[in-house]
């Protein structure tokens, strides 16, 4: 009986240790010298206010940084990042953070290959520059984020095989979502783009992406086809304006691109993008307009 009791106590201690998380209250660098608990989860337990530089620097893989809906606030100048990821690190989750008043919000420095990132349920407001900037071949899961009040929203450089879903982009004077230097096999769905200069710019080697169930509201431009190499993209069940689709390469970009079931807010019965379709719904673009 005594041996069984000792075993039970050791087992309970082990379970408690495994489920433990590291709690922090200040800006810091997380690297190989950091003392992790077993689950490699770091919890921010309070607001960080008026930080005058870069706050969190991550130099490790396989971790979760959870702000628990606490605020990381900058000093509203043009320097410093709220969260900076450095090195060839992968399987990093950043979630439940409220980020305000930095130059940039969440940044991955340098282009790396096959890095897995989860950016989940964060609120980013009033960045001077890019709200989220990731340079990796992915995959990236950018889901359930609020990105509002600034200039540039999300910049994805060489990001493939990713999911950009259920995000709300609002009041960004330049571009909401930008894909550079390869943006292949991505799914962009259930996002709202509201009051952007350009909601989505389809840039260099922007191919085989699925755009579905996105809503475009009050943007200067909904889609900008800006590369002759952008092709084989699929647009379906989106709500947007055909008059706000522009680009120097719109003819070439429509090569092997298909659309179905999109709702055109500016449909007038003779919309050139909607041939013989029911009022307000476009079943197919021509292969080249």
Image (cartoon, rainbow, N blue to C red):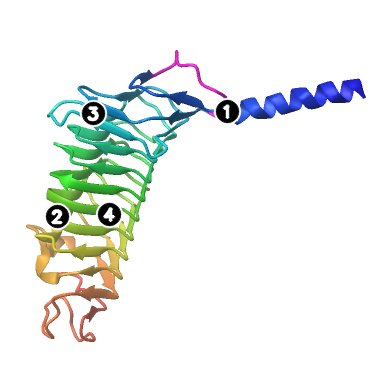
Question: SS at mark 4?
Answer: strand
**Residue at the spot 25% in from the left edge and 47% down from the top edge:** 147
Picture quadrant where residue 281 is located: bottom left
Above or below, 252 against 237 in this view is above
Residue span colored magenta: 30-39
Using the numbered discs, state the Cα–Cα distance from disc 1 to disc 2 in whole angstroms. Answer: 42 Å
In-front residue for pair 123/131: 123
**Do callouts 4 and 1 mark residues in contact (Cβ within 8 Å)?**
no
Front: mark 4 or 1: 1
| Residue 81 circle label | 3
Disc assigned to residue 168:
4
Residue depicted at x 10% and y 58%: 249
- Residue 259 x/y as whole percent: 27, 70
Instruction: Give the SS element for disc 2.
Output: strand
71 sits left or right of 250 in the view:
right
User: How far from the left and from the top, in percent, is residue 25?
Assistant: 39, 24
Q: CA distance from mark 3 to mark 2?
A: 23 Å
Residue at the spot of label 1:
20
Q: Is residue 18 visible?
A: yes
Disc number lying in front (1 or 2): 1
User: Which residue does the numbered mark 2 point to in the structure image?
Assistant: 196
Q: CA distance from mark 4 to mark 3?
A: 21 Å
Whether label 3 touches label 1, CB < 8 Å: no
């Amino acid at each position: 009986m005594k041996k069984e009791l000792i075993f039970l106590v050791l087992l309970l201690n082990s379970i408690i240790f495994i489920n433990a998380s590291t709690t922090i209250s200040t800006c810091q660098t997380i690297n190989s010298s950091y003392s992790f608990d077993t689950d490699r989860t770091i919890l921010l337990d309070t607001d960080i206010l008026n930080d005058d530089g870069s706050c969190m620097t991550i130099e490790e893989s396989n971790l979760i940084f959870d702000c628990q809906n606490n605020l990381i606030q900058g000093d509203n100048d043009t320097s410093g990042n709220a969260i900076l990821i450095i090195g060839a690190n992968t399987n990093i989750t950043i979630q439940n953070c409220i980020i305000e008043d930095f130059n940039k919000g969440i940044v991955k420095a340098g282009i790396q290959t096959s890095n897995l990132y989860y950016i989940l349920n964060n609120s980013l407001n009033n960045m001077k520059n890019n709200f989220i900037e990731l340079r990796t071949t992915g995959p990236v899961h950018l889901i359930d984020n609020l990105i509002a009040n600034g200039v540039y929203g999300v910049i994805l450089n060489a990001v493939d095989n990713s999911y950009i879903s259920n995000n709300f982009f609002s009041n960004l004077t330049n571009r909401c979502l930008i894909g550079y230097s390869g943006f292949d096999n991505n799914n962009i769905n259930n996002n709202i783009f509201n009051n952007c200069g350009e909601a989505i710019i389809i840039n260099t080697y922007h191919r085989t992406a699925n755009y579905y169930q996105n809503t475009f509201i009050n943007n200067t431009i909904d889609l900008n086809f800006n590369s002759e190499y952008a092709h084989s993209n699929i647009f379906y069940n989106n709500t947007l304006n055909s008059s706000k689709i522009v680009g120097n390469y719109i003819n070439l970009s429509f090569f092997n691109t298909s659309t179905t079931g999109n709702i055109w807010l500016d449909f007038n019965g003779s919309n050139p993008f909607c041939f013989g379709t029911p009022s307000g719904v476009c079943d197919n673009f021509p292969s080249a307009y």
